[in-house]
Image (cartoon, rainbow, N blue to C red):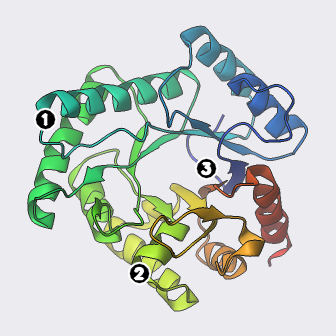
């Protein structure tokens, strides 16, 4: 397993479609041994359902491997909810995802922070920060040393533009951005390489080199309709090759997770292209 990356890893979001066995451990083994990918994101998006004994088995399998394991926390999280019970549930879901990933030997937890609702951006930021600090204090008290990563979000009504996730990372220890290039492309309506260069420059300038050495990245295509649906790379206008060239130029370390519908195919496509870059 890897906690301090020495390179850029590549993997699928969830059990590969081509894996006959559909459980998480089998998916990880298949990803590593059959696909020769060295990253994986456990999808807790509809609930944290991994059992502790399975987490321990994953840890045992990965302990001597150059492999980055991450997870995606449930979609239901909203750290800006108007209902205290929902905020508490959101913190619990994040905590459970982090605890089980940590037991599995994992690296970082990505999550969608929430919605602005009727609050201003500043009000929302302060509420999200306060509630995220509660989670981080709990993890620290239990010595769960893992990155928690608010994701850059696609819709303007969702909390999570690049400045907000960077500011959370400045204000709270062990918080770093999860950079979703498809979401950035959707929210900004830009897909030129100068824009993506600006993003990496901003991260390095405001968070330091450590942030580029510990990146959790999502790449896929995306539709530009109201839904922002994920697309396979070759069916989209996402300049993924240019993005990978940029990651190589900036010597980015961490993990790139494919969120394309064909998850492992695009993970392999990106890995193979990246390996050819000089």
Q: Earlier in the sequence, mark 2 or mark 3?
A: 3
Specify which label sits upstream in the sequence, 3 or 1: 3
User: Residue at 11% across / 53% down in the picture?
Assistant: 126
Quadrant in which the N terminus appears: top right
What residue do we see at 73% from left, 52% from top?
263
**Label 1: element kind:** loop
State the image coordinates of residue 193 (x, y, percent, origin top left): 57, 87
Label 2's element? helix
Residue located beneath label 1 in the image: 83
Q: Residues within 10 Å of mark 1 (few under 14, many from 20)?
A: few
- Whether residues under marks 1 and 2 lie with C-beta atoms below 8 angstroms apart, the answer is no
Q: Nearer the viewer, mark 3 or mark 1?
A: 1
* Rendered view: 237 above or below 35: below
Q: From the image, tell me which residue sits under label 2.
A: 188
User: Residue 64 occupies which quadrant of the picture?
Assistant: top right
Report which residue position mark 3 lands on: 5
Q: Residue furthest right?
A: 34
Real-space Cα distance between discs 2 and 3?
A: 29 Å
């Amino acid at each position: 397993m890897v906690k301090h990356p020495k390179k850029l890893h590549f993997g699928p979001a969830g059990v590969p479609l081509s894996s006959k066995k559909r459980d998480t451990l089998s998916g990880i083994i298949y990803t590593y041994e059959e696909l020769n990918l060295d990253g994986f994101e456990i999808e807790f998006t509809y609930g944290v359902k991994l059992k502790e004994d399975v987490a321990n088995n994953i840890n045992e399998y990965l302990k001597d491997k150059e492999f980055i394991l991450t997870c995606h926390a449930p979609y239901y999280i909203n750290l800006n909810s108007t209902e205290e019970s929902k905020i508490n549930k959101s913190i619990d879901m994040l905590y459970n995802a982090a605890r089980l990933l940590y037991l599995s030997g994992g690296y970082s937890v990505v999550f969608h922070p929430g919605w602005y609702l009727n609050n201003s951006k500043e009000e929302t930021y302060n509420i999200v920060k306060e509630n995220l600090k509660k989670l981080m204090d709990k993890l620290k008290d239990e010595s769960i040393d893992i990155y928690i990563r608010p994701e850059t979000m696609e819709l303007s009504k969702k909390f999570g533009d690049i400045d907000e996730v960077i500011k959370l990372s400045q204000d709270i220890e062990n918080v770093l951005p999860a950079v979703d290039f498809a979401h950035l492309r959707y929210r900004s309506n830009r897909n030129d390489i100068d824009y993506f260069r600006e993003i990496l420059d901003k991260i390095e300038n405001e968070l330091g080199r450590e942030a580029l050495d510990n990146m959790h990245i999502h790449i896929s295509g995306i539709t530009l309709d109201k839904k922002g649906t994920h697309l396979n790379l070759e069916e989209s206008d996402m300049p993924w090759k240019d993005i990978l060239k940029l990651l190589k130029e900036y010597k980015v370390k961490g993990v790139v997770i494919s969120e394309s519908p064909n998850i492992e195919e695009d993970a392999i496509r990106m890995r193979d292209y990246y390996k050819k870059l000089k």
